[in-house]
């Protein structure tokens, strides 16, 4: 199984074990959850127009950052890159994250998709 690599969103260089993390800013998650509640109040019901859907708040991004490149110090939900090196690691963390009520406010699905596509590209 090929090792998953993480590049820093700030400087672009690869992050070595114990030099950084993949994290989400919980303050942004709380703001996003409030924005989603407001959107549902503004647009109640099961179906929506394209213009209504286009106003749906974007998910909060997970970012990989070197410790020295992160001004927040891994604010407060961070996973060390050394714990996310294999597909099995991603599955294990996904199971843990699924217990969090706030996971849908983030782009964790996109992180998984991106790492899957990177693995497919590198094996070709």
Image (spheres, rainbow, N blue to C red):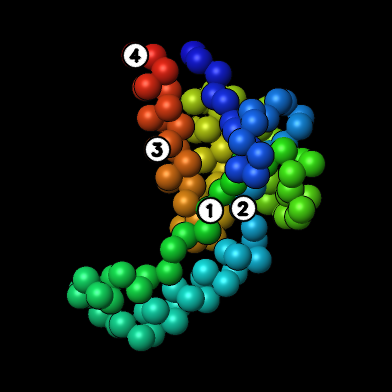
Measured in 3D between alpha carbons, the distance from the residue under mark 4 to the one under mark 3, in whole angstroms, is 17 Å
Q: Residue furthest front?
A: 11
Q: Residues within 10 Å of mark 3 (few under 14, many from 20)?
A: few
Circle 2 — which element?
strand
Query: Can you tell which mark lies on residue 61?
Result: 1
Relative to 89, does residue 59 appear above or below in the rendering?
A: below
Does the CB distance between marks 2 and 1 fall below 8 Å? yes
Please give the residue where the numbered disc 3 appears in the rendered image.
Answer: 113
Query: Can you tell which mark lies on residue 124?
Result: 4
Measured in 3D between alpha carbons, the distance from the residue under mark 2 to the one under mark 3, in whole angstroms, is 17 Å
Measured in 3D between alpha carbons, the distance from the residue under mark 4 to the one under mark 2, in whole angstroms, is 31 Å
Query: Can you tell which mark lies on residue 24?
Result: 2
* Residue 35 point in image, percent of width and height: 48, 76
Between tags 4 and 3, which lies in front? 4
User: At 49% across and 25% down in the image, what residue appears?
Assistant: 87
Circle 3 — which element?
helix
* Residue 41 point in image, percent of width and height: 38, 85
User: At 40% across and 38% down in the image, what residue appears?
Assistant: 113
Measured in 3D between alpha carbons, the distance from the residue under mark 2 to the one under mark 1, in whole angstroms, is 6 Å
């Amino acid at each position: 199984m090929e090792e998953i690599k993480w590049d820093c969103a700030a400087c672009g260089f690869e992050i070595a074990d114990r030099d950084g993390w993949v994290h989400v800013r919980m303050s942004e998650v709380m703001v996003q959850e409030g924005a989603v509640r407001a959107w549902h109040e503004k647009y109640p019901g099961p179906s929506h127009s394209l213009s209504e859907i286009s106003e749906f708040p974007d998910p909060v991004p997970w970012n990989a950052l070197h410790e020295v490149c992160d001004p927040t110090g891994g604010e407060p939900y961070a996973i060390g890159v050394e714990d996310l090196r294999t597909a099995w690691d991603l599955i294990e963390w996904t199971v843990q994250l699924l217990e969090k009520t706030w996971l849908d406010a983030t782009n964790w699905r996109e992180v998984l998709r991106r790492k899957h596509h990177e693995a497919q590209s590198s094996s070709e």
